[in-house]
Amino acid sequence: MTLKQLCDMFLKYQLTKVKASAITAQHYNDQISSLNMLMSFLGQRRRIKDISTLDLQNYKRKLQKQYTKSAHRMNLHISNLKTLFHWAKKNDVLKQIPNIDAISRSKLTNRQRRIFTHEEINKLLAVADIQMKAMIWLGLNCGFGCTDCSDLQWKNLDFENARVEFPRGKTGVQRDLPLWSETIDALKAVPKKGKLVFYTARGNPFVRNVLKTGANGQEKYCVLNTISTKFARLLKKSGLNVPKGTGFYSLRRTAATLAARSGDPFAVQRLLGHANLLMAIRQELLLKVSMSAPVQV
């Protein structure tokens, strides 16, 4: 079997998972990009049995040179490579796979994460519309990201007991979180138009996958994230001068900061919906180098 044949089989399988909402379209697109890079380096017609440990190590060196400032991106490519061969072995596509244990992910260094201050949050809320105001409170209160807000249904909310029960899509971890009074008031102001809490002006979910067919006839999913677009406009409207990369997800980081400063990694794990405690501890370490000013909400 050649590398291209294996990649085609794997991506065809992954596409069925996208259609079943088992993985996100963004994750699928990242896999396409990673495997194209791998085939470009090793050769599409390269036979799997001919891929040596040295080949894989040279590929990692190439990634290290290309992503000198982004270890996270380099690790993503390595993870996708490992996923490809793990899948092939697990599903009996290949009896033997290359020595993928010979390459490892690079350690991520702690870096400063952008979070919002009390004053900045007030400025955002002052110019936000009804729906965006509720989303902002969900981001701060529950650590919700764009997809969380888009997928949230009225049945997940218990206003009487001030709770929200909602699994994190990425990990499947169930979250049962308390709601602040400000969050409840903002949610109650949102008009009910269907089972989802939030809809665009055209009646669509705020984050959705759109299937497109390229010139070569290959199907590809594109992610339409209206929340990110809308929040970017809100930042501009509020007059905040924020660095590049600051977006709706920064609200989740702000929520994580509030939880991390409690000194309880279990609180971080419950809030963020991490699959294991190690992720929560790592998040807490990253947040220790965040903005030193106290965050008040």
Image: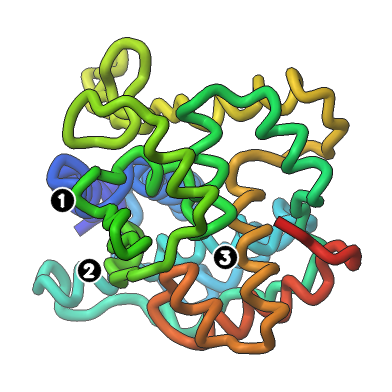
x then y, percent, for residue 68: 78, 58
Residue closest to the eye, 92 or 145:
145
Looking at the picture, which amino acid does disc 3 mark? Answer: Asn
Identify residue for label 1: 13
Identify residue for label 2: 87
Q: Residue at x 79, y 61 (%)?
A: 295
Looking at the picture, which amino acid does disc 2 mark? Answer: Trp
> Which element is circle 2 on?
helix
**C-alpha span from label 3 to label 1:** 22 Å
**C-alpha span from label 1 to label 2:** 10 Å
Q: Mark yes or no: residue 134 visible.
A: yes
Looking at the picture, which amino acid does disc 1 mark? Answer: Tyr
Identify residue for label 3: 75
Q: Which circle's residue, 3 or 1, is located before the other in the chain?
A: 1
Label 2 near label 1: C-beta < 8 Å? yes
Q: Residue at x 27, y 67 (%)?
A: 172
Q: Which circle's residue, 3 or 2, is located before the other in the chain?
A: 3
| Protein image colouring | rainbow
Residue 162's tag is: none
x then y, percent, for residue 176: 33, 70
In which image quadrant can residue 79 be found?
bottom left
Left or right relative to 154: residue 271: right
Residue ranking furthest to the left: 92
Q: How many marks?
A: 3
